Amino acid sequence: MKYSALVLLLCALLPLSNAYCYVKPVKYDPDQPLRTHCQDDVDKTWHPIGSKWRNSECMDCTCDSCCSGFSIPRSFPDDCVSVFKPEECVYVVHKRDDPSVECPIYGAVGK
């Protein structure tokens, strides 16, 4: 009974480990003890504390952390290819020889 509960817990946590996220270190400035804004590491844009935004690398961020804003297809038919569309922050899977025919995605990592 004890082991089945552990297995169930591990299975529940597995999907959470697929997202690519990182914590942003807080830079303390003694000359400015009250922070009202934070800077995006990639775009160098400023955002109010408590806000959410998506940067140019398709990362969904807050002042504390960033996570990938897209899923990466990992399992799809062999005659297909995945292509990242940065303007939409999505991967599209289509036939290698005919990009107009989309393919099913059986498994993905992220988001």
Image (spheres, helix red, strand yellow):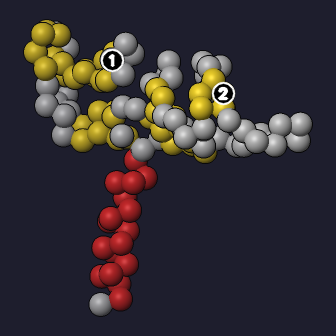
Dot 2: element = strand
Count neighbours of disc 1 (C-alpha within 10 A) and say few if under 14, some if 14 to 19, many if 20 or more. Answer: few
Q: Amino acid at mark 1?
A: Glu
Q: Is residue 94 left or right of residue 83?
A: left
Which x, y percent locates residue 105?
19, 34
Q: Quadrant of residue 3?
A: bottom left
Q: Exactly how many numbered labels are in the figure?
A: 2
Mark 2 or 1: in front is 2
Mark 2 vs mark 1, CA separation in Å = 23 Å
> Which residue is painted at 68% across and 35% down in the image?
36
Q: Quadrant of residue 48?
A: top right
Q: Quadrant of the N terminus?
A: bottom left
Q: Is residue 72 left or right of residue 79?
A: right
Q: Amino acid at mark 2?
A: Gln
Q: Say whether residue 30 is visible.
A: yes
Q: Quadrant of the C terminus?
A: top left
> Which residue is painted at 30% across and 73% down in the image?
8
Q: Say whether residue 41 is visible.
A: no
User: Are the residues tagged 2 and 1 within 8 Å (C-beta)?
Assistant: no
Q: Is residue 61 left or right of residue 36?
A: left
> Which residue is painted at 36% across and 22% down in the image?
89
> Which residue is painted at 72% across and 43% down in the image?
26
Q: Is residue 104 left or right of residue 36?
A: left
Q: Which residue is mark 1?
A: 88
Q: Choose between 18 and 36: the one closer to the eye.
A: 36
Which residue is farthest left? Answer: 101
Q: Which residue is mark 2?
A: 39
Which x, y percent locates residue 22?
57, 42
User: Residue 79: which disc?
Assistant: none
